[in-house]
Image: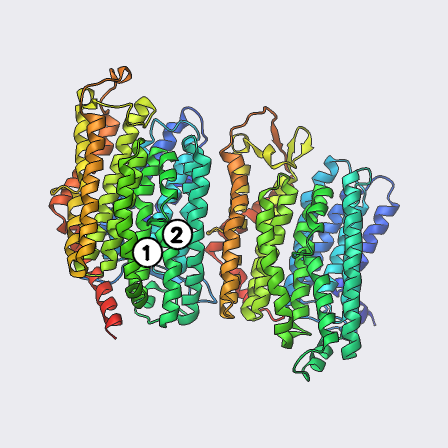
Amino acid sequence: MVDWPLLSVIIFLPLIGGLIILFIKEDEISSNNIKWSALLTSVGTFILSLILWLQFDYLNPSYQYIEKFRWFNDFNFYYHIGVDGISLFMILLSTFLTPICILASWNNVKKRVKEYMLAFLFLETVMIGMFASIDILLFYIFFEAVLIPMYLIIGIWGGSRRIYASFKFFLYTLLGSVLMLIAIIVMYRNTSSMSIEFLQGNYFAFNTQIFLWLAFFASFAVKIPMWPFHTWLPDAHVQAPTAGSVILAGVLLKMGGYGFIRFSVGMLPEATELFIPLIMTLSIIAVIYTSLVALAQTDIKKLIAYSSVAHMGIVTIGIFLVNQQGLEGAMMQMISHGLVSAALFLCVGVIYDRMHTREIEFYGGLVQRMPLYATVFMIFMLGSVGLPGTSGFVGEFLVIVGAFKFSSYVVVGAAFGIILSAVYMLYLYKRIIFGTITNDKLADILDINFREKIILIPLAISVIILGIFPNIFLDPMRLSLEVVISNYEVANAK
Amino acid sequence: MLNSIINIIFIPEIFLASTSFICLLFGLYTNKNSFRQTCNFAFLILLSTTVLIYFNIGSNFANYDMLFSKSSFINFFKILVLVGSAASIIISKDYFLGIKLINFEIPILLLFSTLGMMLMISANNLMSMYLAIELQSLSLYVAAAIKRDSLSSAESGVKYFILGALSSGILLYGFSLIYGFTGSMNFDEINFYLLRYENLNLGLIFGLVFVMVGLAFKVSAVPFHMWTPDVYEGAPNSITAFFAIVPKIAAVALIYRFCLVPFENFYLEWSQIVIFLSVASMFLGAIAAIAQSNIKRLLAYSSIGHIGYILIALVAANDDGVKASSIYMFSYMVMNIAIFAILLSIKVKNEYLVNISDLKGLSKSNPIVSLSISIIMLSMAGIPPFIGFFGKFYVFIAAIENELYVLSILGVLASVISAYYYLRIIKIMYFDNKNNEEQLIFKISFQSKVILSLSLFIIICFILYPSLLINISASLTI
């Protein structure tokens, strides 16, 4: 362990970098300085978060790197942060994807570079802060503050219908999260504590649990998103700039899954037990329905957006199985989806930067001109499908194994969804990459350049590492997840 | 003898009144136009009155036969009123000079209305309460119509006057009923008298309803809000700033004191009225503001919405409610000072900004200003980490403490609706492309700049050390 406030430094380093950028005067020459400072800040944060991982004690299921001091005098609110096995990889995902996002927008963001970088660094601070909070009010503040930079990113640098998409994103998610605020206050009133650690061991009356569960559900089901609350996602994804989609799919959706594990399953076990059939039904509908919708898309980004909803359906199934395989599978699926869907959006970004269209029909035969691109795209496509050896396989496999303990209908539903995912992804790949070039405009398209290699190759490597050595990731989270499961089982055995 | 005179002079209200008269005489007997000087004087007077209140000077003096009372709650709100009033005089000085409306009476009118508000907050008797309300209202009627050659200003003054007079009449009728049925005008005595009853009799209920209507008019709660958008729109911008910042604070304090002191034991009777006022204000404020194209009307509806939240804390009727009200009003004041300091400094085509659509492209020409407006708007919408969130948060804590679940859920839903129009302003500044070539000119005086930076600092940095304000609010007693 380290004896300096490592976690606080990781949280606030991006913000400090952002403040420095704020005072760089923006003109033609210095926009490079702005980009470099943003990149260095985020890379520095990533390196620090690796220290976090290296020094992490696998055998300790509770929070580590705890920092705590009193924040509000009158209530029991603390600035209380720490990391456990569940939040560790969420934080790593955020710190890993932010520098990639900044690199990905190196050349294609031309207007308001300063505000753009500022928004991303602010976003990184609030994302990490949210995953690291142990105080529930602190969590809420970060959870909502995420909306501000994301609203601006979609609205300023987005596509043609960006205003509609940004408003829909903001208001939809705000509607969910304000109900969570009420739930948080009710929790506080019942226990006089805001500590997530304490609340997880606390028992709420059954009726209160149901109310609280529904309020949290409203917030996380919108965020993750579950069918039928997913309609904001395709709009937001399609209209957002590439880096915005990456961070949205990579990290922001995980906030929902993280919240389900921490709050719904962790704090409200009996209500969870009651609502499991609802969740399973919605998840299976999501997996199958959104896969079919994805199959019908003509816009690449929209297709990947719908595939995200389907993948998140697998995650919610895994979480609400509440057994070891299910939860570990859900976590793996979240990490894997964070990398794979982010990478897929980046791949779309690569050809969008060259051709300025995302219509599937426009492309075809890219392998002739872009062999390297075809290769990395294939890795991510297979990761998304869940081919053994890639990250997607581990999560989906574990969830299905876990689901056998619960109900074979769920297994059939989930497996059918996974087959459909192979259908739409392979079909997409065939239409874009294979064949001969029929469109003249593609005749002199260039393969990925050095910057894009730097972005895509680390992602490809991590997708494969995750697939071959899942234990690197499963070991740290195992004990923390076991605590969640045993709490849940004890509460429901009563 | 001398000692007691000094004591009397340093009672904050008397100090304010006498110095205001001196200010008036000064303005009257100087040859050249003394608008600037009276403004500065008014500012100094307000600040020194604040100091007097803060250090509790003259507090051990008589309460004038219980006409007025003293408590930490009263002092806190008095300080808010004085600070808000001082800030609004400073930020509007340049505006008055800009539109050449330089009557030296303006700051003095505002001083007198501030005096009325201070008396209003501390009133402990129906009669003193009524007289204080009239003192502040009469000054404000004149202030609304001060731009004599402008039709809209005169119209807003007349509207305000007629509706204000009507509400005062209703208020007075309510007072007479309460007096008739209890035999006393004093708040504590009314409370003591009512203790003997299980239920209020019909006459008292009528009296209570009439008074609540009058007070709802003063805080501009729906359905007695009609005057607000019109008066905000018609009055000169700087007077609108004053309207938005100061009288609301005093009226909120008054409605709190009226409900929680004489009628504290009849919670059930008045809470029904307040719940309706609160829900209606939140939703009407949120929905009506969406369609506005005039920024002053938008802020009027926004203030109506804010009043709805404040009334939730009143319905909670516990210590947390009092605490929430003070935190909310503080944040409300700071946010309004900040937004008006900006609005009073933006010119489009040599006119002061009125239409929201004129803000287009502001983020290009003045990035810092548009960033500030965005922060204020997000804070008003109650998005963390800004101060507005904590105001709402404390309101909901108070409400849930009293198990007002439905009311709090309605409250958060209204806050989502209202987020739309706050976001719309950000959208206009950042997302919309500028199609016209008129340059927005942002010119701000040094003093306003100080006030603006200070209030922005409070809005952003409140989260870092909230205890400073919260400790004070937690210790307030009504």
- Answer with the quarter of the image where residue A297 lies: top left
Please say whether residue A458 is visible from this viewpoint: no
Helix, strand or loop under label 1: helix
Residue A479 position within the rendered picture, expressed as x and y whole percent measured from the top left: 19, 61
Q: Residue at x 65, y 44 (%)?
A: B297
Which numbered tag is attached to residue A382?
none
Q: Which of A251 and A415 is in front in this view?
A: A415
Pointer 2 indicates a residue of which chain?
A
What residue sits right under mark 1 in the picture? A259
Q: Is residue B260 above or below residue A24?
A: below
> Which image quadrant: the N terminus of chain A?
bottom left
Q: Which of B91 and A287 is in front in this view?
A: A287
Identify the mark nearer the N-term, 1 or 2.
Answer: 2
Residue A78 position within the rendered picture, expressed as x and y whole percent measured from the top left: 40, 62
Q: Residue at x 30, y 45 (%)?
A: A309
Kindly check if marks 1 and 2 are in contact, taking CB atoms under 8 A apart as contact: yes
Q: Residue at x 79, y 45 (%)?
A: B145
Q: Which amino acid does label 1 sit on?
A: Gly
Alpha-carbon neighbours of circle 2 within 10 Å: few (<14), some, or many (≥20)? Answer: many
Which numbered tag is attached to residue A143?
2
Q: In this view, does A113 lie above or below B177?
A: above
- C-alpha span from label 1 to label 2: 10 Å
